[in-house]
Amino acid sequence: MPTGLVALLDDISVIARAAAASIDDVSAAAAKAGSKAAGVVIDDAAVTPSYVTNFTPDRELPVIWRIARGSLFNKLVILLPAALLLSAFLPGAITPILMAGGLFLCFEGAEKVMEKLGGEKHGQTLDDQPADVAAFEEQRVSGAVRTDLILSAEIMAIALAEVSGEGIVQQGIILAVVGIAITAAVYGAVGLIVKMDDIGLHLAKNPSAAARALGSALLKAMPVLLTVLATIGTLAMLWVGGGIILHGAEELGLAGPAHLAHDAQHAVELATGPLGGVLGWLTYAVISAIVGLVLGAIVAWIVHMIAKARGKH
């Protein structure tokens, strides 16, 4: 009997060590997969604040929470099962689907650029005094969740590519960990950004001179930061969307455009020495953004022509 108990405990300890090692493997794989998607995560964090501006302070965090829930739904309920099914049964469809999403990002980015250049304005802000504020909020949240779906798809696809050699169960666990961690990081950062002015206002009333100075600096910096983030968000749509199209075209056999972009990147890296990594990446991002702007403008023109033909304009 003692021998049996000792053997059982020994078996349990082996299983426990194996489980611990498995958890470590999942953690390491999730960290690696998440780091590969860091560029898209930054884009996601830059894009999202533009959907939360123009709300009254009491609605900012609830709106962010609604978008974050939508993002989790996108990643865990829609994209994770779809990614696993496509990976297992129809891997060739992943690239075209991602390219369609990239084209949508190009379209949204081009629309925003055209608005900035004096084109027709799309959508409302609270400054326009919408008749139904609840409907305005619903429209903003829906738009943010739609954009998040495309960015999340790219994040999950990048993560999936990093763990393609794992078993299907482990792939699912890793993608879930990546999805939850990235959502928490992105929307936590967005919440901090949009409430920074309230934090500054609170600090400005503090008896401490240092706290008041910090609060005043935050209040002055927030309008500039939000403007910069809105600009980065628009550019992010274009360079991520354009980059997806370039990479997808390369995967499908049309490698020329991607090769030209990579050649330009490598030329800049070689010519700029220690700054080569940053400037090379920037070169590729600019080329991707130009591609995204051109393609997005074409799609926007087609969409507007169709809308006019249907009598919506």
Image: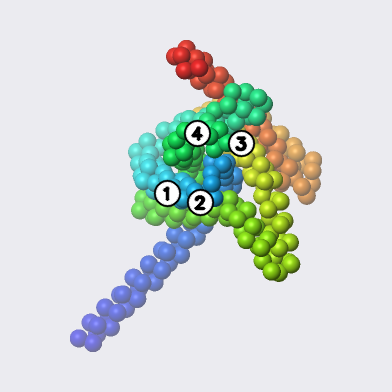
Question: Where does label 4 land, which residue?
Answer: 130
Label 4 – label 2 distance at C-alpha: 18 Å
The amino acid beneath tag 3 is Thr
Using a 10 Å C-alpha cutoff, classify the residue at mark 3 as few (fewer than 14 neighbours), some (14 to 19) or many (20 or more): many
Callouts 3 and 4 close, C-beta under 8 Å: no
Task: Report the Cα–Cα distance between label 3 and label 2.
Answer: 26 Å
Give the labeled residue for mark 3: 234
How would you rate the neighbour count of disc 2 (Cα within 10 Å): few for under 14, some for 14-19, many for 20 or more?
few
Counting the numbered discs, the total is: 4
**Pointer 2 with pointer 1, Cβ within 8 A:** no
User: In the rendered image, which residue does mark 1 sit on?
Assistant: 69
Tell which of 209 and 174 is nearer to you.
209
The Cα atoms of the two marked residues, 3 and 4, are separated by 24 Å
Using the numbered discs, state the Cα–Cα distance from disc 3 to disc 1 in whole angstroms. 23 Å
As drawn, 292 above or below 158: above
For the residues labelled 2 and 1, the Cα–Cα distance comes to: 18 Å
Numbered disc 2: secondary structure: helix
